[in-house]
Amino acid sequence: MNNLIQRSITGALFAFVVLGSIIWDPYAQAIVFSIFMVLGLLEFYNLFSKHTFVQVSKEIGIFIGLFIFSLLVGVSLEWLPQISILFIFPLFFTLILAEMWRKKEHPLINISVLVFGIIYVVIPFFLTIDLNLRNTSYLPNVVGMYLLIWTNDTFAYFSGRLFGKTKLFERISPKKTWEGTVGGIIFTLILGYIIGAYINEGDEMFWMISALIIAPCAIFGDLLESLFKRSLNIKDSGKILPGHGGILDRFDAALFAIPFFYCWAMVYAYF
């Protein structure tokens, strides 16, 4: 019970910071999400701190990741010209080149982990900022996206606790069940309809399809991070959020769902 209360308080404060920054101002969101991004990237590289042969330079990864994030956000905020994006390509090759001087035994694996960390953490956080800057809806699309992700996560948990019997992916996450998964998807669809019909009126199709995209992506995102942690024999990615673990533990579903939702939102806006 104490753990549930702690998780609830932390979750409420976390949601307030995330949604509050999005609704308040794009610049506030950029600041808050840049902090989350750096902490998430640090957590990702720290996952390998005790690994026997993966020896990444988290300083280089965080520096390059923050630089790329700043370039992308600067272009979206129109602080920088769009041609600035071209600097991302030499930055990636600089990251690769740095491995030549580190004299580690497995440079290809180190490079792969460094680059994947940037793709996995930096890009989704940037996409939420860019999508919010394009918002024209009463309820910002990014807010709706997070509400759908958290609804899926919450009701999958409670549905699994109440009705769960059939394991979903026992090798990776023994506690997840098909009953919980279905329950999460159903409640996510319900919320999607409510957003489209009663909040952003007339957008039922957009938000129902969004729910169908977000729910499975959120599940895969959760399973993906569970796969990382299980393969590295780690329980939580960090301890910064009492009752929840680290930043990656709290954003695991979102990091996978964001690129898919972003693409869907861009395609829908185009047509």
Image: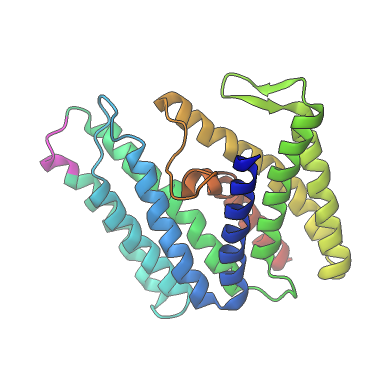
Residue 104 image-quadrant placement: top left
| Whole-percent x, y for residue 198 in the image | 88, 67
- Which residues are the magenta region? 99-104
How has the structure been colored for display?
A: rainbow
Residue that appears at 83% across and 42% down? 186
Which sits in the foreground, 108 or 56?
56
Q: Which residue is nearer to you in this view: 158 or 47? A: 158
Q: Is residue 59 above or below residue 54?
A: below
Indicate the quadrant containing the N terminus: top left, top right, bottom left or bottom right: top right
User: In the picture provided, is 2 more to the left or to the right than 269?
Assistant: left
Quadrant in the picture for the C terminus: bottom right
Q: Where, by quadrant of the figure, is residue 166 drawn?
A: top right
Residue 103 painted magenta: yes
Q: Is residue 40 left or right of residue 197?
A: left
Residue extending furthest bottom? 79
Q: Quick check: 152 left or right of 253?
A: right
> Which residue is found at the position 40% from the left and 27% from the top?
232
Outermost residue to the front: 2
Q: Residue at x 59, y 50 (%)?
A: 254
